[in-house]
Image (cartoon, rainbow, N blue to C red):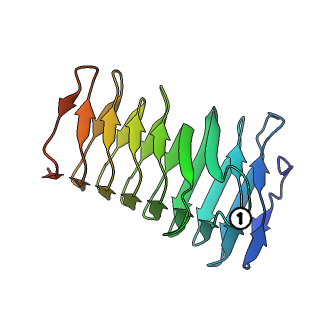
Amino acid sequence: MRGNKKPYPVITSNVTVRSVDINQWYSSPGDQLIIRNNATLTITDDFNMSGAGVLNIVNGHVLMSATSSGTNNFAVNSATSVVNITNGSFTAGTLSEDVDVEIIGTFNLGNGSLTVYGDFDISNSDTFNAEDGTVVINGNTTINGTYNGDDGNTTFNGTVDVRSGGVLNLGSGTITFNGETFVGNSGYRKPRKWNCQH
């Protein structure tokens, strides 16, 4: 998708595509895609963001249904890539199909929701901000960068591994761990379920 010239592409009604690539050629300024008006973008295979690409979901939705043959992953592939959500949702996978999510860049959830049915990975020096949103991760989570729980509500249903150098922060929100949790290279294990609120 080439969208680095104003006006940026805007999705305002439901649409289904096989795959999406934002800013695959590393242009500057980056390509941008906006989803609004309660529209749903359904992606049946991969969603890749590279370079200075930006996804803005404003009262819209992304559903990765994983119904096409392929790797079925969502990858934010650059430290300059950004996802912003306001009054919207991002769902990676379904109850019957896993989609893995890798964050190399910044993901700002706003007051939206993120549901992941596969594994969730935050790379070194990269950041996920839950802000006031709701997060449910049903697969395993690996945090090499920073996960800011902020004032939102996060539920980890799989194993959580906060690697050496990884950071897990919480503001006034809640984080619920329903699986094993390891912190640092020592493999320190938290209780099987840890609901922390502060």
The residue depicted at 16 percent of the width and 52 percent of the height is: 193
Tell me the residue at 70%/53% (across/down): 46
Q: Is residue 73 visible?
A: yes
Where residue 56 appears, as percent x and y from the top left, is 63, 57
117 or 52: nearer the viewer: 117
Point 46% across, 65% down: residue: 112
Q: Foreground residue, 127 or 95?
A: 95
Amino acid type, label 1? Thr
Q: Position of residue 189 (x, y in %)?
A: 17, 34
Image-based side of 109 in relation to 56, left or right: left
Residue 129: x and y in percent read 42, 46
* Crowding near the residue tagged with mark 1, few <14, some 14–19, many ≥20 C-alpha atoms within 10 Å: many
> Tag 1, which secondary structure?
loop
Quarter residue 151 falls in: bottom left
Residue at the (66%, 77%) spot, across then down: 39
Pick the front one: 83 or 41: 41
Judging by the rendered image, the residue that carries numbered circle 1 is: 44
Q: Is residue 46 above or below residue 112?
A: above
Is 93 on the left-hand or right-hand side of 198? right
Question: Is 183 placed above or below 23 here?
Answer: above
Q: Is residue 91 above or below residue 165?
A: below
Image vertical order of residue 25 relative to residue 11, above or below: above
Q: Please indicate whether residue 186 sits to the left or right of residue 57 in the image.
A: left
Q: Residue 164: give x, y in percent of width and height.
A: 33, 21
Q: Count every numbered label the image shows and give the total.
A: 1
In the displayed structure image, the side of residue 133 where residue 189 appears, left or right: left
Residue 152 in sight from this viewpoint: no
